[in-house]
Amino acid sequence: MLAHNKCPFLYSYGEGGQLVYENTFIYMLDGKDKEQTQIRELRNVTNKFMIKELEPETSYIDSMYLLAELKSGKKVKLQVVDNPALQKNDGKYLITNKGDSVGIEFESLPK
């Protein structure tokens, strides 16, 4: 995930469709010069998430992917399927402001 500013919140969708808080997913980044990739461990195994901007700030998110480790130990990189702005690191940002919520869906998890 590449972005700048502070911390939108990431929620996953539980089995019953309820939102499950995962984590902030942009941490300690408050300017373009600090743009970097950050990794967060998730609690819920799913490919559907919600980004919520709850604080008075603007976040710029260039790309996201889900890195899943399979039972075999193999790691697979799953791409965003429903938001072109997040599919590659190309300077085309998803911009969120206080009060925004954005649903994100990744490729299906391998069986």
Image (cartoon, grey):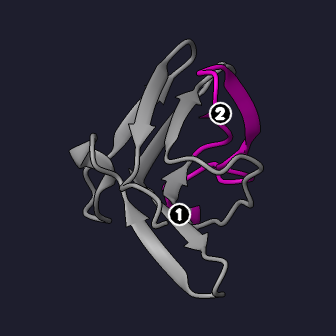
Q: Secondary structure at mark 2?
A: strand
Q: Position of residue 88 (x, y in %)?
A: 28, 63
Q: Marks 1 and 2: which is nearer the front?
A: 2
Please name the amino acid that badge 2 sits on: Tyr
Please name the amino acid that badge 1 sits on: Glu
Identify the mark at residue 11; answer none if there is no mark: 2
Quarter location, residue 24: top right
Quarter location, residue 75: bottom right
Residue at (69, 21) in percent of width and height? 55
Say which residue label 1 marks: 35
Residue at (66, 31) in percent of width and height? 14
Decide: is 78 above or below 70.
Answer: above
- Mark 2, other Cα within 10 Å: few <14 / some 14–19 / many ≥20: many
Q: Position of residue 69 (x, y in %)?
A: 62, 75
Q: Which residues are magenta?
A: 5-34
**Disc 1, disc 2: CB below 8 Å?**
no
Q: Please identify the residue farthest to the front as the structure is shown.
A: 111
